[in-house]
């Protein structure tokens, strides 16, 4: 063990000596950086620490290491990161000589590190980005230019292109042949990034329309009879909409969609893409759909008055219609329809309800820590009295499992406005958003997105800080304030009703649909 420590120190001095001799650091700066390295919670190589401190650029460091033929070995790095011991390193190197397997994969097979830890180590060793593949963060058109079979074989996905450089997320960023193939096909320079195999294949499933609407039954049970889902881009509207369709997807139901573009495909549903080149409007498309005698219609997004009026006309014929809207909250959708010029009597007679949602990050289950919110946080949520024994708040910390983000995965927070007679009268009278919202909270006990987020924070699902980051405080909610106990009681009572509906639904599911519903929520 002493020998390993000695070796570690000499390696640091060697790099430090190079930096000093080349004039990038003074001896006093080297001493300070070495001291900083010891204080850092998560290990970073000396060169990378100097880059982060602004003492030299990443390009200068790469050139320097290349000139002096210095190589940072993965095993040594993982020891320095305290992910494996020197004994583990010797054992793995011995096994590698016997089997010829890749060192990182060998460590995973031996149960010494996880794939996420390997990805983190490779990112540091190679000085390349570590990217968690997410369908909402990449340019989907790039992947569609390449065959699915090729991407699955090389376990890589083109993510985005800036100027003449294409960033590719790879399970094996050291594969020169894969980099060469992408360079030749896209005629661009390639910036490799590293991601886990599991996440890359999950992204490919989504890109090539093999996504399973997991936990769709649970989500759809709350939105079964609604026809507007609202929220900004990336808030999960489309996934919730498809979950609703998947819930209704039965042999006796004919479901037809008009979308631009078709984001997911579902067996048993007729899906159509709006093609502007054909000079067909939403009205033309919906008129053609009506001739097919559908039971359910889905319009991908209402963007203008023409689409709004065509959708409203479809609803007037008695069809169940679903669509999405870009508004901040539920009442905003009603007002936007008015602003588009749709008559209030049409809105009040066709809109059944509006669901608004956002996506928030969920706390990493491996490293979240119990905490009690400070006075400022409680005041931000208008909490004046609270019993500490009833609630379980947590905060984000960060670990290797969540790539030191403190959060892992996302979930939806939602508010549901059911259009009652009182709300219809308010729409007909063109009452302001604040008044309609107050009526909804009084007459239907509408839960706001912020209250739904607070409830999830009390259960340790997310943090109060995350809810504040995503959802603003609507002043109208202060007109009818609720205590934290009232919020929890309202949500849990509604949850019991949803569970009853869900249980009845699952009892009637086919084996295939039951398998689909058991795999988790897509977004």
Image: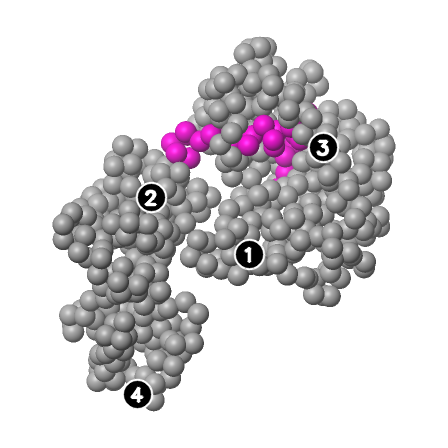
- The residue at which mark 3 appears reads as 496
Residue drawn at 21 percent across, 50 percent down = 102
- The residue at which mark 1 appears reads as 368
Is 488 magenta? The answer is no
Secondary element under disc 4, as helix, strand or loop, is loop
Residue drawn at 51 percent across, 56 percent down = 367
- Give the mark nearer the N terminus: 3 vs 4: 4
Query: How would you rate the neighbour count of disc 2 (Cα within 10 Å): few for under 14, some for 14-19, many for 20 or more?
Result: many
Horizontally, residue 224 falls left or right of residue 95, namely: right
* Structural distance between the alpha carbons of marks 2 and 1: 25 Å
Instruction: Evaluate if marks 2 and 1 touch, with contact meaning CB atoms under 8 Å apart.
Output: no
* Structural distance between the alpha carbons of marks 2 and 3: 38 Å
Horizontally, residue 147 falls left or right of residue 452, namely: left
- The residue at which mark 4 appears reads as 26
x and y percent of residue 133 in the render? 40, 46
Is 224 magenta? The answer is yes
Number of marks in the rendered image: 4
Mark 1 or 4, closer to the camera: 1
- The part of the image, by quadrant, that contains residue 357 is top right
Query: Between residues 6 and 343, which one lies in front from this camera angle?
Result: 6
x and y percent of residue 189 in the render? 25, 53
Q: In this rendering, is residue 374 above or below 29?
A: above
Secondary element under disc 2, as helix, strand or loop, is helix
Q: In this rendering, is residue 41 above or below 495?
A: below
Query: Between residues 173 and 423, which one lies in front from this camera angle?
Result: 173
* Structural distance between the alpha carbons of marks 2 and 4: 42 Å
- Give the extent of the magenta segment: 205-232
- The residue at which mark 2 appears reads as 197
Mark 2 or 1, closer to the camera: 1
- Give the mark nearer the N terminus: 2 vs 4: 4
Mark 2 or 4, closer to the camera: 2
């Amino acid at each position: 063990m002493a020998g390993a420590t000695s070796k570690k120190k000499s390696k640091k001095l060697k790099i430090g000596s190079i930096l000093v001799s080349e004039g990038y650091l003074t001896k006093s700066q080297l001493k300070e950086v070495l001291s900083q390295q010891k204080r850092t919670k998560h290990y970073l190589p000396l060169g990378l620490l100097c880059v982060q401190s602004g003492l030299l650029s990443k390009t200068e460091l790469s050139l320097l290491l290349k000139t002096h033929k210095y190589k940072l070995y993965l095993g040594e790095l993982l020891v320095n990161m305290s992910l494996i011991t020197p004994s583990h390193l010797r054992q793995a190197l011995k096994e590698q000589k016997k089997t010829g397997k890749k060192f990182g994969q060998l460590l995973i097979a031996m149960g010494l590190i996880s794939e996420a830890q390997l990805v983190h180590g490779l990112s540091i060793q190679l000085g390349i980005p570590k990217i968690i593949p997410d369908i909402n963060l990449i340019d989907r058109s790039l992947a569609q230019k390449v065959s699915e079979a090729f991407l699955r074989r090389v376990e890589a996905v083109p993510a985005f292109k800036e100027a003449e450089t294409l960033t590719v997320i790879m399970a094996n960023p050291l594969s020169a042949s894969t980099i060469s193939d992408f360079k030749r096909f896209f005629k661009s320079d390639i910036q490799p990034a590293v991601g886990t195999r599991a996440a890359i294949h999950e992204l490919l499933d989504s890109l090539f329309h093999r996504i399973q609407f997991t936990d769709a039954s649970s989500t759809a049970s709350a939105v079964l009879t609604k026809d507007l889902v609202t929220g900004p881009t990336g808030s999960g509207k489309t996934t919730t909409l498809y979950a609703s369709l998947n819930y209704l997807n039965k042999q006796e139901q004919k479901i037809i969609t008009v979308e631009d573009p078709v984001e997911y495909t579902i067996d048993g549903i007729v899906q159509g893409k709006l093609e502007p080149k054909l000079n067909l409007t939403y009205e033309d498309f919906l008129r053609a759909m009506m001739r097919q005698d559908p039971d359910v219609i889905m319009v991908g997004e209402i963007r203008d008055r023409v689409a709004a009026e065509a959708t409203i006309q479809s609803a007037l014929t008695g069809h169940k219609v679903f669509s999405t809207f870009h508004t901040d909250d539920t009442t905003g959708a009603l007002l936007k329809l008015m602003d588009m010029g749709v008559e209030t009597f049409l809105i009040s007679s066709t809109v059944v309800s509006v669901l608004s949602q956002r996506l928030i990050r969920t706390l990493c289950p491996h490293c979240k820590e119990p905490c009690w919110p400070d006075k400022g946080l409680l005041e931000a949520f208008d909490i004046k009295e609270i019993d500490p024994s009833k609630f379980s708040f947590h905060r984000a910390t960060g670990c290797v499992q969540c790539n030191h983000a403190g959060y892992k995965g996302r979930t939806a927070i939602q508010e549901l406005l059911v259009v009652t007679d009182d709300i219809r009268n308010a729409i007909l009278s063109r009452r302001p958003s604040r008044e309609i919202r107050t009526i909804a909270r009084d007459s239907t006990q509408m839960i706001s997105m912020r209250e739904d987020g607070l409830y999830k924070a009390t259960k340790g699902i997310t943090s109060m800080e995350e809810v504040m980051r995503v959802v603003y405080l609507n002043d109208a909610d202060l007109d009818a304030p609720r205590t934290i106990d009232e919020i929890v009681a309202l949500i849990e009572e509604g949850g019991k009703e949803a569970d009853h509906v869900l249980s009845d639904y699952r009892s009637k599911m086919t084996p295939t649909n039951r398998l689909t519903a058991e795999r988790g929520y897509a977004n």
